[in-house]
Amino acid sequence: MTMVLGISVMLLVGVWTIACFFRPQMALPLLVVFYPLKQNVQSYFSFFLEHSWVFNITMAMGVCLGVAGILRKDPYALKGYKSGYFALLGFLFCYCLSAMLWTPDVARPYAVEQLLSGAPYWILQALLLPAIFSSVERFRSSLGPTLILSCIVSVLFLTNPHGTVFNHRYVIQLGILTEKGFGNPLASAQMGGQMALIAALMIPSGSKAFWLMVRGVAIVLGLTMAVMAGSRGQLTSSVFLVVLLFPLARKVRNLTQFFLTAGGLGVLAVIGYFTITLILKEDTEVTGRWTLDVATRHLDERFETALGLIRWWASEPTSWMFGLGANAFSALPGNAGTYVHNAIIEMFCEYGLFGLGLFCTLAYLTVRHSLDLFRRHRESPPERTTVAILVAFGLYSFILCLKQGAFLGAPEPYYLWLLIAKINLGERAALANQAAAMAEQQQYQPDGAYPGYEDVAAAYGNS
């Protein structure tokens, strides 16, 4: 039975990967479920445990096929790659890479290790994936497949015969070849949070009854994944963003719509409350990480380790501008092989005021692009809620980067910020070409004779 499940999972991966060429937007779901799906496959086949790069290449092929497919039919697929935003992120990456030159010798091997492990994901997620998305509509078309695939992977993950509870976290036992023999629980929790964001905020097309059922199941499964993984940050940030963005995702025109919006948020709150409390009540093994004392102790530990890096930076005036060096945190006593677990402190101390300035500029431009998208699509309910989900993804990954991940080792939240900018720049280019075509058409018609020019010009920013 275990072998049948494993073969079924691999067939699913193969079919989905090939489908990316014909439906390029289906590449995004592969990245959302990547790590939990990989753990599932590794638990069934030791080959992928010993040669994990084979599975990585299989998933990367999905994105590459998606890019090849989109280049055939979308003239705006590469719009934005020459923009200042892409150049700024590229410059930030090169600067952080160069910081290995002045990092302490004892920390340099760990920085190189981060780079080698993170480079393929930077290429895949930050360089290739944005080509697939040049409009809000195309991103919207990826949400349904993402929800369905993540629900399938969640069920496979939670019912995996190799699943167990270790250190108050539900994990999949992979074997002796990985550290402690277990998969990373943060990956499954992150997918669960993204599921909850999509399901709570989206306005689907197609059968309302079907999608209402899928959304309900996805919320329950997503929250279950986060709670069982013991990932407090993933759970609280996803719930917080649903509450924050749900009113923005639904345009309120009158009192009736206000009560409908409030009622919808209330239903989500009830589902979330009962899901979380039921899991914590029934599975006492995972409750250990959810007590206030444990959460406070872990927060204090993170704070103290980060404070140690700040003190070191403050004691080195020559490092204030350009930082202590890439992954310098690992040079502190007792921190070998680790990182600071906070992107802002990482930028501030390891890459200096200059690196932090680049980071803040990138964040500011992302906010500008987000507001531009919202203004353009606020009158269309499906597109408005899609922009809300896109922004939610960017905020979600940003919140998580305050507790996990290092710049060279993981392209989050930067690839999602890049998606926001890329989609906005792609739509700007399309509107500009459309406005130019209408302006050219005006030469052959009486003044004001052609419809829609005012709308296009207004959307593009030219009245």
Image (spheres, grey):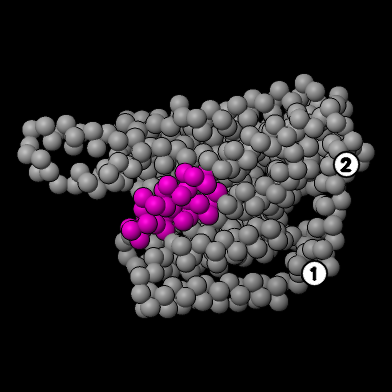
Q: Do the residues labelled 2 and 1 touch (CB within 8 Å)?
A: no
Q: In which quarter of the image is residue 292?
A: bottom right
Residue under the image location 47 percent in, 48 percent down: 370
Could you say which disc has been placed on residue 292 in the image?
A: 1
> Can residue 377 be found in the magenta stretch?
yes
Residue under the image location 24 percent in, 48 percent down: 455
> Can residue 65 be found in the magenta stretch?
no
The answer for how far apart the CA atoms under marks 2 and 1 are is 28 Å
Camera sees residue 429: yes
N-terminal-most mark, 2 or 1: 1
Residue under the image location 49 percent in, 45 percent down: 368
Stretch in magenta: 366-394
Q: In which quarter of the image is residue 338?
A: top right
Mark nearest the camera among 2 and 1 is 2
Residue 86 placement (x, y as % from top left): 51, 31
Residue 223 placement (x, y as % from top left): 60, 65
Q: Specify whether 5 is left or right of 455.
A: right
Q: What residue type is labelled 2?
A: Arg
Mark 2, Cα crowd under 10 Å, few <14 / some 14-19 / many 20+, is few
